[in-house]
Amino acid sequence: SSTGAFQRLAKSPGFRGVSLTATVLFLVWLGMVVDYNPAGALSEAPQVFIVMHWLFVLFYSLELCVRLLAFESRGNALRCLGFKLDIILLLELIFAACVPAGNVSMQRFVGILDFVQFARVVSLINAMPELAILFKGLAVAFRSLLWCVLLFALMIYIFAICFSRIMAGTPDSEMFVSVAEGMWTLWTHGILTGSPGDLAEYIQEHGGGGAAFLFVLFFLMSFSMLVVMAGVLCEVLSSVASAEVGKLKAAYIVTALRGAQCSSAFWTSKEGFLHGLQSEPGSVLQQHGIDLAELA
C-alpha cells in the first residue's frame, strides 16, 4: 500500500531526525575508535567498542527494514541507489566485526574499507540545503576549474621555455635543463609551495635578470586565480541557489496543495486539474504568486 504504517513512519520527520542524529553520532564514533581503540580487530577491542559497534549495526538494520517495508513494491528498493548504498555500508560494518584477530593484512584492509562509511555524510548534506547548494555548485564549477588548470599550465609552459632559454649553458642550472624539467621546477618549487623567494634567488644566481620573469608569472597566476575563481564561484552559486530555491518553492506548493481539499482527479487528469483551479487549490496557487490564467 502507498499509505501504510511503514510509509508513514519512513516519511515522518521524527524518523528522519533520529536517522540523521544516529549518522552524526556514528561519524563522531569513528573518530573515537581511531583515537582510543588500540585493537586491530573488533574481537580484541574493549567491551564498549564492541557494544557500540553492534548497536550501530542493529540500528542501521532496523532502519533498512523500515525503508524496505515502506516501498510499495519491494523490487523498487533494489532500484534505489541510496538504498543499495546503505546495504553496502551495513554489510561493511558486519564484515569489519567478523575479521579474525591476528590477521594483520585483513585488519589493514578493513581499516581502509572503513572509509566508505563516510558516504553517510551524503544524508547530512541532503538534510542541509546550504551544504547541498555548495556541493552542487562545486560539481557545476568542475568544468570551469579544468579550464583554469589549463590556463595555468599554459602560463607555466610559456615561462618554462623562457627560463630554459635564459639559463641555457649556465653551470649548475639542473632545474631548467629542459622545458619539462622547468615546468616541474616552477610547479613544485614555486606554485605548490607559494614561496618563490628561494626559486627567485636561484634564478637570479644562475640566470641574471630572469628572476623578474618569475615574479611576473606569480603575479599573473595570482591575479588570474583571484578573478576567475571569484567570478566562477559567484556565478555558480547564484545559478545553483536559484535552482534550489525553485525546487524548494515547488515542493512547498505541492505540500500546501496536499493539505488542501484536492480530489484525486486533480492529480491525475487535465480536466480535474482545471476544475480544481476554480476551488481551494486555485486559491492556494494564487497565494504563492502563480497566475492561474497561464496554467489554464
Image: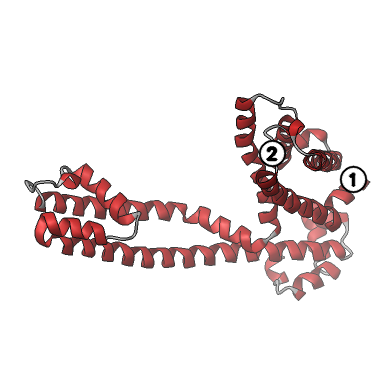
Q: Badge 1: few (under 14), some or many (20 or more) residues near its Cα, within 10 Å?
A: some
In the rendered view of the protein, which quadrant contains the C terminus? bottom right
What is the crowding at mark 2: few (fewer than 14 residues within 10 Å), some, or many (at least 20)?
Answer: some
SS type, badge 1: helix
In this rendered view, identify the residue nearer to me: 153 or 196: 196
Q: Residue furthest right?
A: 5
Above or below — where is 101 with respect to 32?
Answer: above
**Amino acid type shown at disc 2:** Leu
Q: Residue at x 80, y 71 (%)?
A: 284
Q: Residue at x 88, y 50 (%)?
A: 9
| Figure coloring | secondary structure
Q: State which quarter of the image contains the N terminus.
A: top right
Give me the disc on residue 294: none
Q: Is residue 64 left or right of residue 203?
A: right
Residue 116 image position (x, y, % from top left): 63, 40
Residue at left offset 90%, top offset 48%? 3
Residue for badge 2: 85
73 relative to 232, above or below: above
Q: Is residue 126 left or right of residue 201?
A: right
Residue 174 locus on image (x, y percent): 17, 44
Q: Quadrant of residue 130?
A: bottom right
The amino acid on which the numbered mark 1 sits, given as a three-letter code, is Phe
Q: Residue at x 75, y 36 (%)?
A: 45
